[in-house]
Image (cartoon, rainbow, N blue to C red):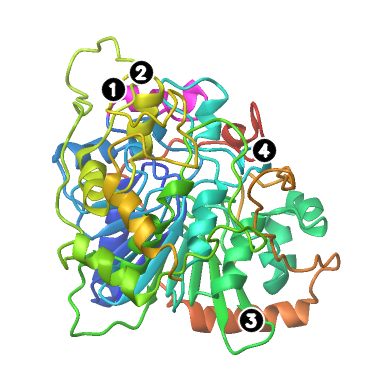
Amino acid sequence: MRIAVEGCAHGELEIIYNTITEAEKVDGKKVDLLICCGDFQATRNLTDLKCMAVPDKFKDMCSFYKYYSGEKIAPVLTIFIGGNHEASNYLQELPYGGWVAPNIFYMGYASVVKVGNVRIAGLSGIYKGHDWLQGHFEKPPYTDQTLRSVYHVRNLEVFRLKQLSGKIDIFLSHDWPRGVTQYGNVQALLRKKPFFQNDIEGNCLGSPVNMDLLQKHYPSFWFAAHLHCKFAALIPEEEGSRNTKFLALDKCLPRRKFLQIIQVENDANIPLKLSYDLEWLTILSLTNHLLSVKCGMHMMPGSGDTVRWMYTPTEEEKEHVLGKMNNILQVPQNFVKNVEPYDPNSSPRKTEAPSLRTNPQTTELCNKLGIDDPVALLQVLNGIKEVKRDSSFSNTDLDSSFAAELDTSASESFDQTFESSSCTFDDEDSSFQSSLETQPVGSLRHRMTPLKLPPAKLGLSSPESSDELSSKVNEEVSEKIPVVPIEPDMKKFKRRNQSIYTSQEDSVE
């Protein structure tokens, strides 16, 4: 399977697809899949544009709305995760993933899917220690604070990803895994991004939970974006034979290395269709009771707890969920437009205020699995929607103990049934991670599984070892593709400077 990997898309879908088409013409080989590592900017209209955490002067509709409206169709199956520059109100409708436009699939807060027999896991957002333990409490219209916290990674999604077993072929994140720079050509990186040096030496560049996940699963490939440069690394397992080929890519701008085409082994007898991963669906079902939509600390169970704390599914549990899905794991083509798309030819009118909406795709999946839609729970909590309640629940009891305010008798029954079961480097403009670390509070009823992070290496790699590693990674990770010039008749980019990323609350946002 030939896969095109994109760094930060920043809404420039037309340019990305045109670049893929030009690459296909050069080598005569078709690209089967495009994966994007965040900052996708799926803005359907001017209301969505209000829900992006960027200064007003940088808010541009770009070209996604054409694919949402049906004016254009994505020429290749596209999968993406969220970053820190997104239409958060739209993506919040699809917490477990779904189609944002025909042939364009968002992976949700976290997810695992398959294309053919290639298993792809993803984690949306960026890591911030001060929001790590929160529930998914944000709702549109957002405040200045929640406009940013809505895309911060939560411990629930990482806890769920840790329950996975078996091989992961590709892992997608927006943040880099913390400490990944020690496995690549650091000196070449610093020639392009000298202001990374303090963070690298202090071991605070990137996300600690991403490195924790990498060292838990060692996927064959890990792709990321966010820092707007191309960087390759090879991360070997300390005691074992596995290794992960890491590649970060730039943002979509002229003469920037934002796209790479790789070849991944796939069973030719399996059609290249998008399917749910059965183990992941089972994990969602088993951990539904851990979901919280409240603002406040929410801990995951740990090994010292008396309740179940390992949710890697048994075969019986997976079979149970497969039955709920009617033995069909292929993702249905159930995209629907639920708002009016932007029309550049219509006269300007007052934009509507963003509202808290459910999405039929999420409703359908939740009904099949017997799990809760976080948006529907938020609607209950905010009095937007009334539901039948069991008398044992209080009016505000919507926390992780029982996420059962919607009629979830099926999921409760399920939990009771199984409770006893057990490359090259480049360039300019960036944001970087300097996150607060939040320590688990021992007095709370659940403990967070501790992170296992690599030791910080304060010294930088030698040029010789770095060059040898870079050459090895470039041979193993990717095919070279020619630089495709952007001709005058294609859309000209508006240069987005680092003021987008260094202004306001955090330098990394």
- The residue tagged 1 is 386
Q: Secondary structure at mark 4?
A: helix
Does the stretch in magenta take in 48? yes
- The residue tagged 4 is 130
* In front: label 4 or label 3: 4
Q: Quadrant of residue 64?
A: top left
Q: Quadrant of the C terminus?
A: top right
* Disc 1 + disc 2, Cβ < 8 Å: yes
> Who comes first in sequence, dot 4 or dot 3?
4
Residue 46: x %, y % from top left: 32, 23
* In front: label 1 or label 3: 1
For the residues labelled 1 and 2, the Cα–Cα distance comes to: 7 Å
- The residue tagged 3 is 236
For the residues labelled 4 and 2, the Cα–Cα distance comes to: 27 Å
In the rendered image, is residue 54 in sight? no
> Who comes first in sequence, dot 3 or dot 2?
3
